[in-house]
Image (spheres, rainbow, N blue to C red):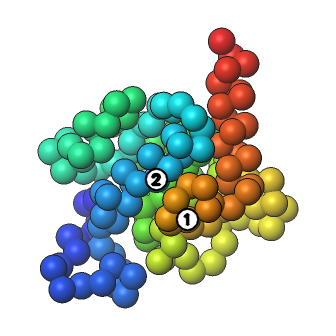
């Protein structure tokens, strides 16, 4: 959040850069991912924003914020995630996505080029989604369901 400004009332998010990704986008994705999973998958937020700014996300059950770490530690922790949702224009998130063997969700209005090689993206979804989770790409839904199977197997 610290590197980006607030979206102005008359601005179209798809047409501007260096603007904070609306929290509604993340809320919709959490709901969609959990819908595909069929359960409340845990969510960890990495952000330099204040708790008050992140309050709508932190109010969602099963959502927590990681304690502040040195940036390199946060980057490596993010890269170990089972699914990464990047803020639009966040090179920090993009680097984590590049390093990860996990699906990476990018804001559909701000995708400029793939982060990873094609062979990785054939196994792990990379791209943007919007609308009902039922309409999301099959690979992303398979990746989310694999996360559920993996978490069940660890019990």
Q: In the rendered image of this protein, does residue 102 appear above or below residue 3?
A: above
**Residue for point 30% across, 44% down:** 57
Q: Residue pushed farthest right?
A: 119
Relative to 87, say whether 149 is above or below: above
Mark 2 neighbour class, 10 Å CA radius: few under 14, some 14 to 19, many 20 or more: some
The quadrant of the image that shows the C terminus is: top right
Task: Name the foreground residue: 69 vs 20.
Answer: 20
Q: How far from the left and from the top, in percent, is residue 10?
A: 18, 86
Q: Give whichever of 76, 97 is nearer the camera.
A: 97
**Dot 2: what SS?**
helix
Q: Residue at x 57, y 80 (%)?
A: 112
Tell me where residue 1 sits by quadrant.
Answer: bottom left
Residue at position x 68%, y 54% from top? 140
The answer, for residue 12, to whether it is visible in the render is yes
Mark 1 and mark 2 in contact (Cβ < 8 Å)?
yes
Q: Is residue 127 left or right of residue 13?
A: right
Q: Position of residue 22 (x, y in %)?
A: 30, 64
User: Looking at the image, which is closer to me, 129 or 101?
Assistant: 129
Query: In this rendering, does residue 95 appear at all?
Result: no
Residue 15 % position (x, y): 37, 87
Q: Is residue 142 left or right of residue 113?
A: right
Say the numbered circle drawn on residue 29.
2
Q: Position of residue 141 (x, y in %)?
A: 68, 50
Give left or right: position of 102 versus 61: right
Quadrant of residue 58 in the image?
top left
Q: Earlier in the sequence, mark 2 or mark 1?
A: 2
Local crowd size for mark 1, using a 10 Å CA cut-off: few (<14), some (14–19), many (≥20): some
Q: State the residue at coordinates (53%, 43%).
A: 35
Alpha carbon of mark 2 to alpha carbon of mark 1: how far?
8 Å
Residue 48 higher or lower than 68, as above or below: below
Q: Residue tagged by mark 1?
A: 129
Locate residue 76: give its quadrant. top right
């Amino acid at each position: 959040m610290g590197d980006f400004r607030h979206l102005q009332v008359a601005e179209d998010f798809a047409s501007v850069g260096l603007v904070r990704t609306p929290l509604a986008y993340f809320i919709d994705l959490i709901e969609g991912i959990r819908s595909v999973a069929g359960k409340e998958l845990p969510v960890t937020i990495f952000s330099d924003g204040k708790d008050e700014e992140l309050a709508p996300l932190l109010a969602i059950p099963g959502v927590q914020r990681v304690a502040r770490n040195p940036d390199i530690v946060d980057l490596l922790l993010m890269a170990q995630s089972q699914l990464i949702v990047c803020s639009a224009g966040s090179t920090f998130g993009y680097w984590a996505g590049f390093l990860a063997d996990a699906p990476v969700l990018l804001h559909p209005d701000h995708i400029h080029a793939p982060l990873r090689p094609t062979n990785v993206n054939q196994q792990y979804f990379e791209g943007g989604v919007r609308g009902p989770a039922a309409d999301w790409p099959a690979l992303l839904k398979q990746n989310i369901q694999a996360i559920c199977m993996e978490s069940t197997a660890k019990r």
